[in-house]
């Protein structure tokens, strides 16, 4: 999740903030066309006026089986994270990949509050787009994106437009993941409690995840995840209300479960189940 553990530790000790959880890259390393995908460049505007960029990948089938709003992790931008969803159009899904403010071609400076505005702008766009079935929309986030998705699905202005929520390898709270990071090195363990309290936990997903119900939510975790330990997903699952599902993949690492074609088919089955209710 975090590109530089050393930088995180030092900044936490000096006084942390949620900005530590964003590691943006402005340069695009590829486009969907480079990997054989049709796409549209989408320009959005958040409620506070920040200009945002996204890619829309149309489904290979007509009509689409559903539409997925994808929220990526904390590092780089959609040009690297597109690999996580490049299989979805062929499986019949429209996908909108959003770059939060400060990432890729999106303007602004990343913050958690700002990211919530950005997600809302993307949801607003999908609701207004011709051809999108508003009763077949799914919110899908990985790592930081999973934590953002869980919060938005519980508190976001347009949370009710989603028929299901997928939370993959997410942390349960900003303070808890900061403590986990500090606990990995012996010489910082003494600081994990005092330093973590400098981290803003206002958007901690574990505190609100119960309010996603009655929308179904799926939690995915890898047993070998050393970046966001699976205990975070377990805490989120425990705090959520039904309908909820938890998949633990003992051999998978961070956001690694969906690299397996069989797991992708399993996810397709779950999505079909929730959008057909």
Image (spheres, rainbow, N blue to C red):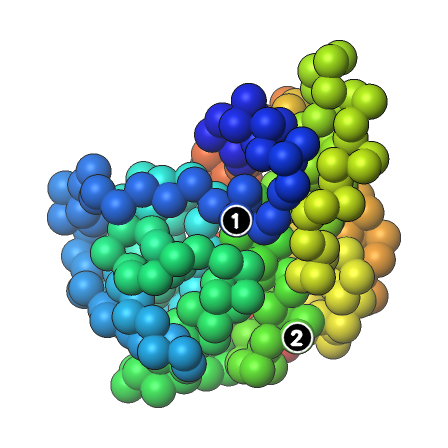
Residue 19, numbered label:
1
Residue at the outermost top position? 186
Q: Is residue 195 left or right of residue 63?
A: right
Identify the element where label 2 is drawn.
helix
Q: Residue at x 81, y 47 (%)?
A: 235
Residue 155, numbered label:
2
Image quadrant holding the C terminus, namely bottom right
Question: In the rendering, at what x and y percent does residue 41 appear?
Answer: 19, 64
Question: In the rendering, at what x and y percent does residue 37 appear?
Answer: 20, 51
The residue nearer to you, when weighing 111 against 135, is 111
Question: In the rendering, at what x and y percent does residue 200 appear?
Answer: 68, 54
As displayed, is residue 270 above or below residue 62?
Answer: above
Image quadrant holding the N terminus, namely top right
Q: Quadrant of residue 273?
A: bottom right
Question: In the rendering, at what x and y percent does residue 265 appear?
Answer: 50, 46
Q: Residue at x 73, y 13 (%)?
A: 187
Q: Quadrant of residue 29?
A: top left
The residue nearer to you, when weighing 115 against 199, is 199
- Crowd rating for badge 2 (residues with CA inside 10 Å; few <14, some 14–19, many 20+): some
Identify the element where label 1 is drawn.
helix
Choose mark 1 or mark 2, whichever is in front: 1
Q: Which of disc 2 and disc 1 is earlier in sequence?
A: 1
Q: CA distance from mark 1 to mark 2?
A: 21 Å
As displayed, is residue 24 above or below residue 239?
Answer: above
The residue nearer to you, when weighing 145 against 24, is 24
């Amino acid at each position: 999740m975090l590109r530089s553990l050393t930088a995180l530790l030092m900044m936490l000790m000096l006084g942390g903030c949620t900005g530590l959880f964003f590691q943006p890259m402005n340069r695009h390393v590829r486009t969907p066309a480079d990997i054989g995908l049709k796409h549209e460049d989408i320009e959005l505007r958040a409620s506070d006026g920040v200009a945002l960029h996204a890619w829309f990948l149309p489904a290979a089938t007509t009509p689409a089986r559903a539409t997925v709003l994808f929220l990526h992790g904390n590092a780089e931008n959609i040009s690297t994270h597109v690999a996580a969803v490049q299989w979805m159009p062929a499986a019949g899904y429209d996908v909108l990949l959003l770059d939060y403010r400060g990432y890729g071609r999106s303007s602004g400076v990343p913050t958690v509050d700002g990211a919530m505005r950005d997600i809302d702008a993307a949801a607003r766009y999908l609701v207004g787009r011709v051809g999108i079935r508003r009763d077949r929309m799914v919110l899908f986030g990985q790592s930081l994106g999973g934590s953002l998705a869980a919060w938005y699905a519980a508190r976001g202005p347009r949370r009710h437009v989603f028929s299901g929520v997928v939370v993959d390898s997410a942390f349960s709270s900003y303070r808890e993941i900061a403590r986990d990071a500090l606990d990995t090195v012996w010489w910082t363990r003494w600081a994990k409690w005092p330093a973590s309290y400098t981290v803003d936990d206002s958007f901690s997903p574990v505190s609100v995840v119960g309010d996603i119900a009655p929308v179904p939510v799926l939690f995915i975790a890898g047993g070998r995840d050393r970046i966001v330990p699976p205990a975070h997903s377990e805490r989120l699952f425990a705090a959520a209300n039904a309908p909820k599902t938890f998949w633990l993949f003992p051999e998978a690492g961070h956001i690694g479960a969906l690299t397996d074609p069989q797991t992708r088919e399993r996810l397709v089955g779950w999505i079909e189940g929730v959008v057909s209710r």
